[in-house]
Image (cartoon, helix red, strand yellow):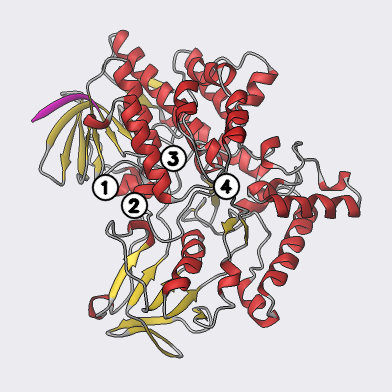
Amino acid sequence: MEHFDAAVIGAGQSGLYTTYRLKVEGLSVVGIDGGAGFGGVWHHNGYPGARIDSDSVDYSLQFSKELYEKWRWHERYSDAPTLQNYHNFVADELGVRDDFRFNTRLEGAVWSSVTQRWHLSTSNGDQIRVQFLIMCTGSLGAPKKLAFAGLERFKGQWAQTAHWPREGVDVEGRKVAVIGTGSSGVQSIPALAQDADQLTVFQRHPHWSIPARNRPLGSAEQDAVASTLGDAVRMSYRDFLPVDAATVDALALNQPGSPRAFASGEAARPASSYTPAQRRDVLEKQWEFGGHGLTYVFSDTTTNLESNQYVTDFIREMTIERIGDSRLAERLTPNYPAGTKRLILDIDYYEAYSRDNVDLVSVLETPIVELTETGVRTTAGDHEADLVVFALGFRAFIGPLEDAGIRNEAGTTVADVWSNGPRTLFGLMTPGFPNMFHVTNAGSPSVLGNAMLLAEFLGDWIAECITHVRSQGFSSIEASDAASEEWMHTVDGYAQELYPIRRAENQYMVHVNDDGSRFFQPFSGGMKEYVLHVHRATEQGYAGFTLT
């Protein structure tokens, strides 16, 4: 039996930074990750065409200007290998490489009130006791499980985008089937089409996708961004000191409404504040600029259906123009309001369908029946394939916690507690699970926030919280039921006010409860509001948490 103060599960950005911060606080730490190296989702999602859909310059740890300036990005939207390299760079710079065990999955974690410790079991047979368990497994760390009849009979090769083989997959000259047209499908299809002899795309529902406008990134541009970082942002995140309006605004980097997201360099305004000609001009400029700013090009796009319709109609018009074929465009354009699901940023996605070797199959019209020895069978017939790529997405939020086999002393799992919707306090803890923290999960800004800044904030908070618990003579901290319930009401309130249109759509951010009610899982009030909520509770002696 090995003993550590804390275990960090996951070697992505939050795992790296949290491990570093815990070590700064003097704790002994063991890091565990099922992959072969650092990178988290970027280690596993190494499929052709995989790249980030946030600006690379924002996908950097920013607590240290020296660290920030040591690394140079070469593209606006970096690809998976570059992101893996960045994580390795950070691991070495922060001195945490030797703290991690790779190719090791957490397969069980049980809390004991007697020892006040978590007892961990890993896939390699490790038995470890820790006082604190920090799940840095993110929101999108567990792929959807495959449930296709005949998969075991298929004689070709198959792969999941969410767990792409490290050795890669040879596509040259092969007949490839891609099942799924979410973000990973949209990114991989153009890349696969270049090398495949034949590519058949199986689509259930189309999604809104817009040009990423990826481009080379020069040093001068990165230097300019670096000059806007520094003391104000670092102080606010590390010390919970949003001292004035300007500093609080600095926390909104890459948030909806942030000037950096827009071609104009100005914050968004309501659609009604523009003339029709001005609206068109704003939309066209944002289209050429690229990025997720198009979702928030008007400040009321997610709250006002009329404003949303301007954006939706514009994207539909531009998408039909990209596709060129009106019948194909009808099959590839969705009917839901733009931005209610995360816009996909693509590089030549629709253009791929103009290739002679690419076909589209609607599984709504002709559902998949099974996999055969030689390909995919639908109700309309057989499609030959010797490589099937499953681009099905993730069991978002709960998936990684469910897979880790975590149980409290009563044998209850996190999934049990979340059975009728997520139940967390600030997205940091689930009631009934002492000394277990989860990072970037439901109830935090999660997928709506800047991943690196959120990782820093939560890593700082967890490290300082643990130091407080230990220094005050306590052995455990736990979120209370009442505070967790109140926080989830707060989260839902923000969503109803700020994201009523998005909340109404079926998507991975929305949990549909047993009674049919809907819950928008991320905190949608923005990073500024989130920091202030957590800061207020902390200043009130960790209000909402029980320390024993």
Q: As drawn, which residue projects farthest toward the top? A: 472
Residue underneath mark 3: 441
Q: Is residue 430 visible?
A: no
Q: Main secondary structure of the magenta part?
A: strand
| Marks 3 & 2, CB-CB < 8 Å contact | no
User: Badge 2 local density, few (<14 within 10 Å), some, or many (20+)?
Assistant: many
Residue 218 colored in magenta in the image:
no
The numbered dot on residue 44 is 2
Give the percent coordinates (x, y) of residue 363: 49, 78
In the rendered structure, the answer to whether residue 9 lies left or right of residue 175 reads left
Give the percent coordinates (x, y) of residue 118: 21, 31
Foreground mark, 4 or 3?
Answer: 4
Image: magenta residue range: 1-6
Question: Mark 4 or 1 closer to N-term?
Answer: 1
Q: Is residue 87 above or below residue 164?
A: above
Residue at the (37%, 74%) spot, across then down = 172
Disc 1 from disc 2: Cα separation:
7 Å
> What kind of element bears circle 3?
loop
Foreground mark, 3 or 2?
Answer: 2
Residue at the (23%, 80%) spot, across then down = 153
Q: Is residue 67 above or below residue 409?
A: above
Residue underneath mark 4: 216
Residue underneath mark 1: 35
Foreground mark, 4 or 1?
Answer: 4
Disc 4 from disc 3: Cα separation:
32 Å
Question: Mark 1 or 2 closer to N-term?
Answer: 1
Question: Mark 1 or 3 closer to N-term?
Answer: 1
| Marks 1 & 2, CB-CB < 8 Å contact | yes
Disc 1 from disc 3: Cα separation:
20 Å
